[in-house]
């Protein structure tokens, strides 16, 4: 999924990611102590998808930081689609191979409903 993340997004959101990580560790240190930076970034993205106000704020920060609004929208759309695919368990064989999806998470396969 790194190819889908707009350039410099992590740098632009560094302060927000730091606050988010601190908050999550304060809430439940034992659960999140093993998370690396990549896992916290993924959790951050999933959490902003649930809150339209926060998503709008993050988009404004990213656009002001130099990210093209079109690229940001594509990234958010792909993130939403990925979350939906996780919930439904519908994956293409190519995605199963490239994203290393565990077989227990696969409920159905498809050739048309793809991210990659």
Image (cartoon, rainbow, N blue to C red):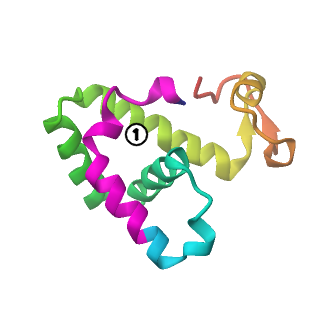
Indicate the quadrant where residue 92 lies.
Answer: top right
Residue displayed at 34% across by 57% down: 18
> What secondary structure do most residues of the magenta stretch adopt?
helix
| Residue farthest left in this picture | 64
Which residues fall within the magenta stretch?
Answer: 2-23
Percent position of residue 113, x then y: 64, 30
Percent position of residue 97, x then y: 77, 25
- Residue corresponding to mark 1: 76
Is 10 magenta? The answer is: yes
Residue in front for this viewpoint, 17 or 88? 17
The C terminus, quarter of image: top right
Indicate the quadrant where residue 109 lies.
Answer: top right
Is 89 magenta? The answer is: no
Task: Say whether residue 92 is left or right of residue 34.
Answer: right
Percent position of residue 76, x then y: 40, 39
Indicate the quadrant where residue 35 lies.
Answer: bottom right
Up-down relation of residue 93 to residue 61 (above or below): above
Residue in front for this viewpoint, 100 or 89? 100
Q: Residues within 10 Å of mark 1 (few under 14, many from 20)?
A: many
Up-down relation of residue 46 to residue 8 (above or below): below
How many numbered badges does the structure rendering display?
1
Residue displayed at 31% across by 30% down: 8
Label 1 element class: helix
Percent position of residue 32, x then y: 57, 65
């Amino acid at each position: 999924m790194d190819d889908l993340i707009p350039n410099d997004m992590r740098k632009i959101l560094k302060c927000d990611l730091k606050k988010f990580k601190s908050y999550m560790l304060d809430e439940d240190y034992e659960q999140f102590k093993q998370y690396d930076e990549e896992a916290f970034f993924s959790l951050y993205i999933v959490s902003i998808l649930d809150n339209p106000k926060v998503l709008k704020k993050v988009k404004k920060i990213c656009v002001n930081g130099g990210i093209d609004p079109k690229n940001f929208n594509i990234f958010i759309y792909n993130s939403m689609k990925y979350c939906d695919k996780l919930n439904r368990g519908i994956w293409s064989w190519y995605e199963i191979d490239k994203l290393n999806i565990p077989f227990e998470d696969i409920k159905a396969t498809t050739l048309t409903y793809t991210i990659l």
